Amino acid sequence: MAGIADLFRHLSGLANLVRAGEIDRVMGEGADAVVHNAQNRLGVSQEGWPSLADATVLERDRLGFPADEPLLRTGALRDSITATEERTADGVTYDIGVPADSPAGAYARPQELGTEGISAHPIPPRPFIVPAIEEEQAGVLRRVGAVVRSALD
């Protein structure tokens, strides 16, 4: 009987954790970490990114922007990266990216994925959202796991 009593105690602890919103809080912190990671990638050449085209460098100079800050001019793209919370019956999820209706929505996707093969003036991919998610994922899972383990102790 002690096994069943322990099981009920642990399940009760998990239920209390969910009711208290601890898992949602940790998930929100993880989403914020991904947003900040993606924002910090802009303006700094990342591994795998090609150099800017000569024409782009000349245009940046003509407009008064530093030549060596890829994907960063006014900060509109950086400032448009968000995490949008969605609550469903299954829990909370976060949509991380640049909303299509934001000031940078029209050019975020082509920068992330590139336009090679679909544009007369192709843009090579310079991903910033996906690498941020990949880099932060293990830490988010660790923090969620720690919260769950604390409820089971």
Image: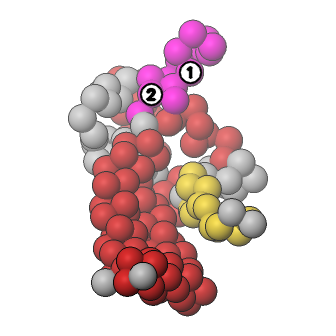
Q: Quadrant of residue 140?
A: bottom left
Provide residue 22's location: percent of width, then percent of height: 49, 83
Cα distance in 3D space between marks 1 and 2 = 7 Å
Residue 71 coordinates in the image, percent (x, y): 43, 44
Look at label 1 and name its amino acid. Answer: Thr
Which residue is at 37% across, 24% downward? 53
Specify the label residue 115 is tagged with. 1
Crowd rating for badge 2 (residues with CA inside 10 Å; few <14, some 14–19, many 20+): some
Q: As rendered, which of 107 and 85 lies closer to the eye?
A: 85
Q: Is residue 90 left or right of residue 9?
A: right
* Helix, strand or loop under label 1: loop
Q: Circle 2 — which element? A: loop
Instruction: Tell me: 130 left or right of 18.
Output: left
The residues colored magenta run 113-126
- Residue receiving disc 2: 125
Question: Which callout, 1 or 2, points at the residue further toward the start of the chain?
Answer: 1
Q: Amino acid at mark 2?
A: Pro
Q: How many marks?
A: 2
Residue 57 is left or right of residue 17, and the answer is left
The rendered magenta stretch, by its main secondary structure, is classed as loop
Position of the C terminus, as image quadrant, is bottom left
Q: Is residue 102 magenta?
A: no
The 10 Å Cα crowd at callout 1, few under 14, some 14 to 19, many 20 or more, is: some
Residue 120 sits in quarter: top right
